[in-house]
Image: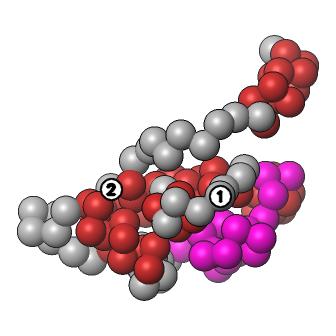
Amino acid sequence: MCSWITNGLPSFAISEMTGLGTPLYMAPEMLQTRHYGAKIDCYSFAMVLWQMCTGKKLMDGFGFDKDSVPPMRVAFKACYEKLRPIMPADCPPALADLIRACWEDAPEMRPSFQQILEKLSDLG
């Protein structure tokens, strides 16, 4: 199974920019309709990792009343004002650092998934 995944990855690396996705998980470069690459997935992964760390819905992490502020507005605040979910105090520092690195505004500052895997392995 793992060799099938590894052998199949190169074909997944070439994809078209469709601009489709869930707004809160979208990297800023997607929302700004700039050219984007594989690092958009790193940003989305940070949001999923934050949810796993907190056990909360992503919308709840931004500190807005979900009934009065639409998710797209929060997504644009994340994009243009660099708003990110609130990191809980009990999140292990190394994990918090990884999440913050993955949701960096500039794609070139985000780690590769190989680097993420190494950091997760170090966390044990």
53 vs 111, nearest the viewer: 111
Residue visible at 38% across and 55% down in the picture: 23
For residue 5, side relative to residue 63 (left or right): right
Residue on which disc 1 sits: 35
Residue 42 seen by the camera = no
Residue 44 seen by the camera = yes
For residue 24, side relative to residue 13 (left or right): left
Instruction: Indicate the position of residue 36 as horizontal and vertical percent values.
Output: 66, 56
Residue visible at 65% across and 58% down in the picture: 35
Residue visible at 75% across and 74% down in the picture: 109
Q: CA distance from mark 1 to mark 2?
A: 28 Å
Single out the mark in the foreground, 1 or 2: 1
**For mark 1, does the 10 Å Cα neighbourhood hold few (<14), some (14 to 19), or many (20 or more) residues?**
few
What's the residue type where badge 2 is placed? Lys
For residue 110, side relative to residue 25 (left or right): right
Q: Which mark is residue 74?
A: none
What's the residue type where badge 1 is placed? His
106 vs 92, nearest the viewer: 106
In the image, the segment drawn in magenta is 91-114
Residue on which disc 2 sits: 57
SS for tag 1? loop
Residue visible at 42% across and 84% down in the picture: 81
Pointer 1 with pointer 2, Cβ within 8 A: no
Instruction: Indicate the position of residue 39 as horizontal and vertical percent values.
Output: 70, 57
